Image (spheres, helix red, strand yellow):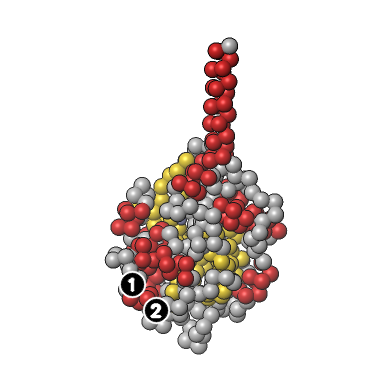
Amino acid sequence: MKLVKIFAVLGVIVALLAGAVFHYFMDGALPEDPEFAINIEELRELAEAPSELRPTTIEYEIVARRDVPKLGTQAGLERSPITMARAVFRLRSEWGDTMIDVGMTDATRQEFMAEDVFEAEAMERVTAAVAGARSIVVTHEHPDHIGLLGQIESIRPDADGILLTAEQLAGIPKFADNGELPAMLAGLKPVSSDKPTVVAPGVVMLPAAGHTPGSVIFFVAMADGREVLFLGDTVWNMSNIRDALGRPRFVQQFLMPEPEDRGAVYDQLASVIALAEREPDLIMLPSHDEDNIDGLVKLGLLSHQMNSEPEPALQAETAP
Ligand SMILES: [Zn+2]
């Protein structure tokens, strides 16, 4: 009788443990009817601009990287290493260059991402690119994406500027030297975060709060007709899209600076997957998937290194 009791208690413990493992690590199923919608027709309409003003080239730099077990990026128990690369993108255009994310200094990396390996030369090229850009936007307010703006003193005087939402602006002081907004950003008028907004010719910002309150996705209509979706951290790896599996709860709840909104991020991933099926030519660019970036470089769709001179902005055009 005693033995039966012991087995019963053990059984309950095993069941509880299995339930917890499933809940925190393995449950990544997406909603069938996501509330988030990506209206590609609306984005295409907003992105309309003369082809000579739209971006011709996408350049990237990896400013830091580290390997993590796959189970840290996608629900499941796969422990094989996956590289989390901190990519920054620059869209080249005759209108002027647009930065998508700005990276971080090594001091910021040490404080917030101590296990990352920093790429100092890449970050030097990014810093020069930011200084020469006409338009600067970010996918969200985490240090690897927005950090440099906490230390910035100037950008080119004819720039249309730094186009951030109120939620993104609120993130900058956390990565500033003195914990305050740099003077040149203090008077910045935020971009609306409740509707898609044009931030440069051919470049549309789509609000997508979830990973952080200030998360956005960029839709870009390139001069040659290519269409690109810059997903930021809505998706960390293309395998989230291929396998239709979101990030696990233990990462969402315990490993982020502030827990992300699981429902919102899962809705967004489900709608990205539906869109990818409908629009197979749409290029997807999560910020941290280096294999995906390498594949696009091989196809000639992305270029490495921001080492050339900034494009001179056209004098005639002012607002995007
Ligand atoms: Zn990130």
Q: In which quarter of the image is the N terminus?
A: top right
Between 2 and 80, which is closer to the camera in this rendering?
2
Task: For mark 1, give the secondary structure.
Answer: loop
Is residue 157 in sight in this rendering?
yes
Neighbour class for label 2 at 10 Å: few (<14), some, many (≥20)? few
Image position, residue 75 (x, y; %): 56, 42
Neighbour class for label 1 at 10 Å: few (<14), some, many (≥20)? some
Task: For mark 2, give the secondary structure.
Answer: loop
Give the quarter of the image for residue 185. bottom left
Image position, residue 58 (x, y; %): 51, 65
Q: Which mark is residue 266?
A: none
Image position, residue 34 (x, y; %): 67, 56
Q: In this view, does 64 lie to the left or right of 270?
A: left
Residue drawn at x 48%, y 52% as measured from the top left: 259
Mark 2: is the Cβ under 8 angstroms from ligand 1? no
Give the quarter of the image for residue 156. bottom left
Image position, residue 258 (x, y; %): 45, 54
Give the quarter of the image for residue 142. bottom left
The numbered mark, 1 or 2, whose residue comes first in the sequence reads 1
Residue drawn at x 35%, y 77% as measured from the top left: 184
Q: In this view, does 182 lie to the left or right of 318?
A: left
Is residue 297 in sight in this rendering?
no
Mark 1: is the Cβ under 8 angstroms from ligand 1? no
CA gap, disc 1 and disc 2: 10 Å
Q: Residue 182 carries which label?
A: 1
Please state which amino acid type lies under the numbered disc 1. Answer: Pro
Q: Is 138 rendered above or below residue 4?
A: below
Q: Which mark is residue 187?
A: 2
Please state which amino acid type lies under the numbered disc 2. Answer: Gly
Residue drawn at x 56%, y 52% as measured from the top left: 262
